[in-house]
Every structure is written in structure tokens, then in C-alpha cells.
Amino acid sequence: MQQHEKQALRNHGQTLKRLAERGGLGWIEMLCVLENREYDFRTKLTEEVARIKVLEIIKDEKSHHLELCIDNYDFTTTELVRIYNMLMNYSDSCENLDLKTKITKMINKRIEK
């Protein structure tokens, strides 16, 4: 997501870190940032359609890019759960196993707090 920092600033006037601190982005907002386009409040796009598109973009990225994002971006617990569920739904049981384990540990650590 770091490569999309400028777009997040343009769309929301806040850094990705600050957005994460405030609860993260909705699916439509995340899609706009990932596609490097301005957020349009009049969009007819639904959250569900945006979710599918975001998950496709993430799936198309190599897993090491996703891992870099997870290591360098302060995702909310909800966002980590979304990413974990995406990995479970869109990859076979062995694919991205290390990443799934890492996310599970991150979620559990936050739950323990």
C-alpha cells in the first residue's frame, strides 16, 4: 500500500498510517487508492463490488508484496481479518501458508491485549 500513499493523501488528506489509526478504509475507498484514482462520492459502485475488485488486485499481486504491506502498514484488526479471509477464500490451503500464519499471529497478539 505504501506506493499508494500519495493517492491516499489526495483522496483523504491523511497518510495511510493516520487512516489506519482512524479505522481504515472502506472497500470503495481502498479500491480508489489501489487504482490511483480520486474518490468519487457519487459512485454507483457498491461495497461488495469494490470488495471483489480489491481482493482481485491483492490476489494478482505477488505474495511478497502483500507481506511487505503487512509488515510496513499498521492495519487494523478488522483489515487483517479481511486480508486473512481473502487469502483463505482465494488461495488453496498450501498457497501463502507463511503469510496466513503471520497474519494469524498478528491477529491473536492483538486479541490478547
Image (cartoon, grey):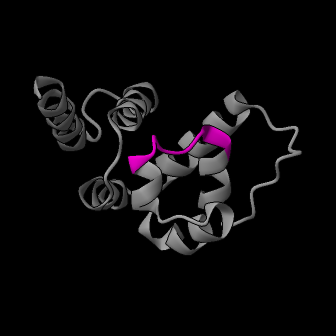
Image coordinates of residue 17 in percent, x first then y, are 39, 59
Rendered location of residue 103, percent (x, y): 23, 38
Q: Quadrant of residue 100?
A: top left
Reply yes or no: does residue 24 show up in magenta. yes
Total tally of numbered discs in the picture: 0
Side of 112 where 4 appears, left or right: right
**Coordinates of residue 113 in the picture (x, y in percent):** 11, 29
Range of magenta residues: 21-28
Q: Does the magenta-highlighted stretch encompass residue 93?
A: no
**What residue sits 68% from the left and 39% below the top?**
50
- Residue shown at the point (44%, 25%) measured from the top left: 89
In which quadrant of the rendered image does the N terminus lie? bottom left
Query: Above or below — where is 82 with respect to 63?
Result: above
Image vertical order of residue 103 relative to residue 66, above or below: above
Main secondary structure of the magenta stretch: loop
- Above or below, comparing residue 65 to residue 24 in the picture: below
Judging depth in this view, the residue of 18 and 70 nearest the camera is 18
Q: Nearer the viewer, residue 103 or 56?
A: 103
Q: Residue at x 16, y 35 (%)?
A: 101
Q: Quadrant of residue 46?
A: top right
Q: Residue 106 appears at what percent x and percent y?
A: 18, 38
